[in-house]
Amino acid sequence: MVNEAMRQVWAETAPSWVEHEQVFDRVGSAAADAILAVAGIGPGDSVLDVGCGTGALLAAAIDAGASATGVDISAAMTEAAAARVPAADVLFADAQTEDLASLSTAPFDRVVSRHGVMFFDDPVGAFANIRRACSDGARLAFVCWRTLAENPTFTLGAPVLMARMPELPPMPPPGAPGPMSLAEPERVRGVLGDSGWADVTVEPLDYEFVYGAEGDDGVDERVTMLLGTPMGQAMASTLEPALGPDGWAALLDELRAEVRKHVVDGHVRHPAACWLVTASSGSRA
Ligand SMILES: C[S@@+](CC[C@H](N)C(=O)[O-])C[C@H]1O[C@@H](n2cnc3c(N)ncnc32)[C@H](O)[C@@H]1O
């Protein structure tokens, strides 16, 4: 089935994401702000959020006086988004294959996504499908990751676990569906151009992940976040039974000590390196 691997990944990862929604929203708030600043959502707009997760951008669209539709391939995410933003329409579907143009809330004037558009088997087909559901001159605004090397959110603390793994999974080839599939700006431009989007801009967006609320250094939050990623979950499911309760607890202490090295001014911090991408649906006549 189309997008089956990523559907599986999100089925396994979404429950942890939903549980820690507030953490993901806090560390990702700068990305949401950047998207909203360029999307220009206003009263009366119909907004589509692709890979809406638990609905942070849906809530912002409703607050701006727009109508909002979220689409996500994970049932747990869509349930959480629908509960959080009852005024939004939330669809449990694959944005690549679902006939979005036939939705009662189409055509869309604004399409937004925070890290939700990198998981398609067929990115050109997916972005063409999304564009077909837009009004003429609709604006697309999304944030995606730059390279793995620039984004410690995927790696900070991970070597402590990796060192104990009997074998590591192979790295996905460049461009494969996954968080870094749009890391190359030329690929972003190529995919959007080939799917009919016009006036594409790809600008760097740099901000900082800051873990921990007031009075909390964020060490446990970072550890939880790492263990909630697909890679973290896979390593925990191998190591926890292999090490037993005491060994696993000792490894977590080691992991916390490693993460604690990244406390600056009272909180664990690291840079986040993204692309802020905009485009126009142009005239579809
Ligand atoms: C990194 S999360 C971001 C969630 C949300 N946008 C946020 O910022 O909190 C990526 C989301 O994209 C969704 N997703 C992945 N592939 C998808 C697809 N083909 N169609 C719709 N949603 C998809 C996942 O289920 C997940 O909720």
Image (cartoon, rainbow, N blue to C red):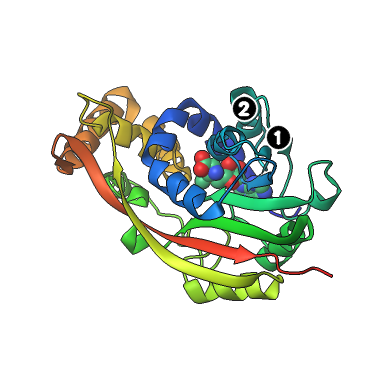
Q: How many marks?
A: 2
In this rendering, position of residue 215 left or right of residue 83: left
Query: Please, is residue 126 above or below residue 35 in the view?
Result: below
Q: Quadrant of the C terminus?
A: bottom right
Query: Please, is residue 238 above or below residue 138 in the view?
Result: above
Residue located 64% across and 52% down the image: 111
In this rendering, position of residue 272 left or right of residue 57: left
Dot label at residue 90: 1
Q: Residues within 10 Å of mark 2 (few under 14, many from 20)?
A: some
The kind of secondary structure element at disc 1 is strand
Q: Looking at the image, which is closer to me, 234 or 217?
A: 217
Mark 1 or mark 2, which is nearer to you? Answer: 2
- The amino acid type found where label 1 is placed reads Val
The reply to whether callout 1 and callout 2 are in contact (CB within 8 Å) is yes
Q: Position of residue 154 (x, y in %)?
A: 37, 50
Is residue 228 visible to us here?
Answer: yes
Residue located 70% across and 34% down the image: 90
Q: Position of residue 53 (x, y in %)?
A: 58, 38
Residue located 35% across and 47% down the image: 165
Q: Position of residue 194 (x, y in %)?
A: 68, 75
In this rendering, position of residue 43 left or right of residue 30: right
Q: Looking at the image, which is closer to me, 154 or 29?
A: 29
Task: Please name the residue that numbered disc 2 is placed on.
Answer: 85
Q: Quick check: is the Cβ at mark 1 less than 8 Å away from ligand 1?
A: no
- The amino acid type found where label 2 is placed reads Val
Q: Position of residue 183 (x, y in %)?
A: 46, 66
Distance from disc 1 to disc 2, alpha carbons, whole Å, reads 9 Å
In this rendering, position of residue 260 left or right of residue 71: left
The kind of secondary structure element at disc 2 is loop
Q: Earlier in the sequence, mark 1 or mark 2?
A: 2
